[in-house]
Image: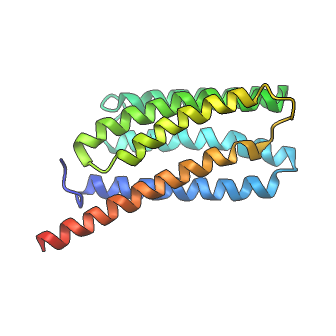
Amino acid sequence: MQNQSSPQSSWLRSYYFVRALFSIGWIIAAILVSGQSALAFVLLVIYPAWDAVANLVDARVNGGLKANPAQSLNVAVSTITTLAVIIAVLNSTYAVLAVFGVWAILSGLLQLSAAVRRWRIYGAQWVMVLSGAQSALAGAFMISKSFAAVPPSILDIAPYAGFGAFYFLLSAVWMTVAAYRKAAVQG
């Protein structure tokens, strides 16, 4: 297992904090624009686009796309989802929720895969394993809700982003505490 205070561990902690902050900001923005369809459209497109960029940067920092197949696939899935959201928005909010549901399932399974691989290297990945599994379950829930009679809105996606923020923040804090404990024992 890699040292919890190594540059790669520091990167991962920072990455998790940034992912959490982005999701929190996105949720706040979603609540503020929930009745404004044009702004909600922009936020709905930004969310998977951000995920694609974040996974791309993280994969490159951690050895490149070839060394991180789950993240490489997640970049592709999130990019395709961004395009699918653009098309779905032109169709209906039901279609948007279904697209987000499929994306949540796929990205959750890919996150689970990346977390299992990283667990062996960095430890403290149990939170990301839970997050990946819950993302897949949330995706199934979103798909089922996309068939409901009540038209969905951006607020139906906000809880998904909220759980993502929670798990990224918890992972970052967990890794930070572990690094401080390790430094205290060694120092």
Depth order, front residue of 65/16: 16
Coordinates of residue 129 in the picture (x, y in percent): 40, 40
Decide: is 87 above or below 25: above
Quadrant of res 99: top right
State the image coordinates of residue 72 (x, y, percent, origin top left): 42, 30
Q: Can residue 63 be seen in this view?
A: no
Q: Is residue 41 rendered to the left or right of residue 71? A: right
* Left or right of residue 93, residue 172 in this image: left
Which residue is pictured at 46% across the width and 30% down the height?
109
- Residue 170 falls in which quadrant of the image? bottom left
The location of residue 180, given as percent across then percent down, is 26, 69
Which of these two is toward me, 135 or 46?
Answer: 135
In this view, 41 is above or below 182: above
| Side of 131 relative to 39 (left or right) | left
Identify which residue is drawn at 52% across, 38% down. 134
Q: Can the viewer see residue 83 in this picture?
A: yes
Image coords of residue 162 (percent x, y): 61, 51
Give the quadrant of the C terminus: bottom left
Q: Nearer the viewer, residue 79 or 147?
A: 147
